[in-house]
């Protein structure tokens, strides 16, 4: 799976959990400040992503993933 495909899936998951249109979820969007998400929603996003990509992200990887793009990079490391 390439970066574009990963970004599309991650964006879809984030938009779904936060009930936003995908076009309102740009790669540089920060979960808390820009998208209005909370910590429980971030955990839900991570759970969906881990399921969709059949991977497991560490707490550290999740903690340093402030933006959609950050999360995409973490996923790419697991599916590469």
Image: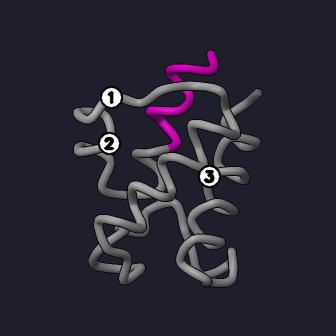
Residue located beneath label 1 in the image: 58
User: What residue is shown at x 52% (from left), y 46% (from top)?
Assistant: 47
Residue found at the very far top of the displayed protein: 80
Q: Are marks 1 and 3 in contact (CB under 8 Å)?
A: no
In the rendered image, residue 45, in percent from the top left (x then y), is placed at 51, 56
User: What residue is shown at x 50% (from left), y 21% (from top)?
Assistant: 77
Q: Nearer the viewer, residue 1 or 50?
A: 50
Quarter of the image where one finds residue 31: bottom left
Residue located beneath label 2 in the image: 62
In the rendered image, residue 48, in percent from the top left (x then y), is placed at 60, 49
In the rendered image, residue 49, in percent from the top left (x then y), is placed at 59, 44
Q: What residue span does the magenta drawing correspond to?
A: 72-80
| Label 2 packing within 10 angstroms: few (<14), some (14-19), many (20+) | some
**SS category of the residue bearing label 1:** loop
Quarter of the image where one finds residue 22: bottom right
Whichever of labels 1 and 3 marks the residue nearer the N terminus, that label is: 3
Identify the disc placed on residue 44.
none
Q: Nearer the viewer, residue 65 or 45?
A: 45
Q: Identify whether 26 is placed above or below 79.
A: below
User: What residue is shown at x 64% (from left), y 38% (from top)?
Assistant: 51
């Amino acid at each position: 799976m390439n970066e574009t495909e990963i970004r599309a899936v991650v964006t879809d998951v984030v938009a779904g959990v936060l009930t936003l249109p995908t076009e309102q979820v740009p790669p540089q969007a920060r979960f808390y400040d820009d998208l209005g998400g909370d910590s429980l929603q971030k955990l839900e996003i991570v759970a969906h992503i881990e399921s969709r990509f059949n991977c497991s992200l560490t707490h550290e990887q999740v903690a340093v993933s402030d933006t959609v793009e950050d999360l995409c990079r973490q996923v790419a490391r697991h599916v590469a």
